[in-house]
Image (cartoon, rainbow, N blue to C red):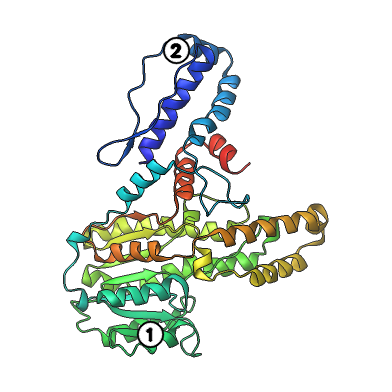
Amino acid sequence: MGRWIRTQLASRLKSRFCESSVGNVAPQDTIISPGGVPRSPRQPEIQIESSEAAAAETPFMAILLAATRIAQPLARLALNTPQCKNGVATGLRLLPEVQAAASAWRSQRCYATEVEEISERPVLITGCDSGFGFSLAKFLHEKGFIIYAGCLLKEQGRGGSKDLDNMKSDRMRTVQLNVCDSEEVGRAVDHVTRTLKDPETGGLWGLVNNAGISTFGEVEFTSMDTYKEVAEVNLWGTIRTTKAFLPLIRRAKGRVVNISSMMGRMANPARSPYCITKFGVEAFSDCLRYEMRPHDVKVCIVEPGNFIAGTSLYSPERIQSIADKMWDELPEIVRRDYGRKYFDEQIAKMESYCSSGSSDTSPVVESIGHALTSTTPYTRYHPMDYYWWLRMQVMTHMPAAISDRLYIY
């Protein structure tokens, strides 16, 4: 699909460039093939010698034309959806027929080739106190897996561990687990090893590194302690837990599923603490995948879009609390240079972004389920709406001068 987008953009840019330099050329409409995959009809032959000559004489004008004209063919794919209103996330939306076909194409998960004996396969999930982890533990339990639900607040009797324990199922086993504490991770490994049916040969089928935290704030607004705190959970916690449980995974020839984010593929203003940790998770996962291939261990990455509304990461009160603390701790020179008005405007943008996300976490949970059950899981899963999916493709495949102009500036 990424190659199709590049081809579409190149062909449309070429036709529109020639249209401005040579003459009017009728734009080509995107059509859907019988297989449901968008494609472009054959373009008419165009004489482009004069446009190439003009571009050679004025390269700056050619670049400027490309940067301005590229938005028009992309805008033809635009479609406003309920998730993108009132200026919350203005951008490109796919046409209804394209979205329907692409949705059907991408939702086809190959469950016909599921792994066997699911009821005998144990899976450890971190971060099951709430959000994705809590929902995933219940979802995989219903499918028949043996669940080790790592909960930060189990010993305090709070969070999702209480609800999971109340299920009274011998296949739902909550475990006290703080991914930032090496000793606690070690105790969790010992507990899982003791309770596995056959730790020497059976091992642990799946590890889902889901535990994570998030924050916001521009670079000059963010303290070094905040950077370290987010990295300790999202990045070092993922690595620490993976290294500890990897021998059990390797023996079972099992799966490692790391929860990254679309912010691990494309950066965004005011999200640098979160972005750098998710970029790190992406790199770690790729390296691990290469190394585990000889051992028949599959490593998958799930890159959710905006599901903040469904994970309870931020409430309006928490956002304001973080903002007030951030402002109070800013150096005087930063407060004076930016001013409170600009600061409050950025906080308002974050509030809008948080309220615009999807509250239905099932696409993420089902993607993780596919990674654990399919005999041929995908390397990367992209549970997100099509605004963010298209934006991610543009920002990872197009020159920065173009993608920045479309989405950032």
Q: Determine if residue 187 is in view.
A: no
> Residue 212 in the image: x percent, y percent?
49, 69
Residue at x-position 58% and y-position 70%: 229
Up-down: is 371 above or below 240? above
Question: Of helix, strand and loop, which one carries label 2?
Answer: loop
How many other residues sit within 10 Å of disc 2, few (<14), some (14-19) or many (≥20)?
Answer: some
Q: Nearer the viewer, residue 103 or 56?
A: 103
Q: Quadrant of residue 331?
A: bottom right
Three-letter code, disc 1: Thr
**Label annotation for residue 48:** 2
Contact (CB < 8 A) between labels 1 and 2?
Answer: no
Q: Determine if residue 314 is in view.
A: yes
Q: Quadrant of residue 124?
A: bottom left
Up-down: is 114 above or below 60? below
Please name the residue that numbered disc 1 is placed on. 174
Three-letter code, disc 2: Ile
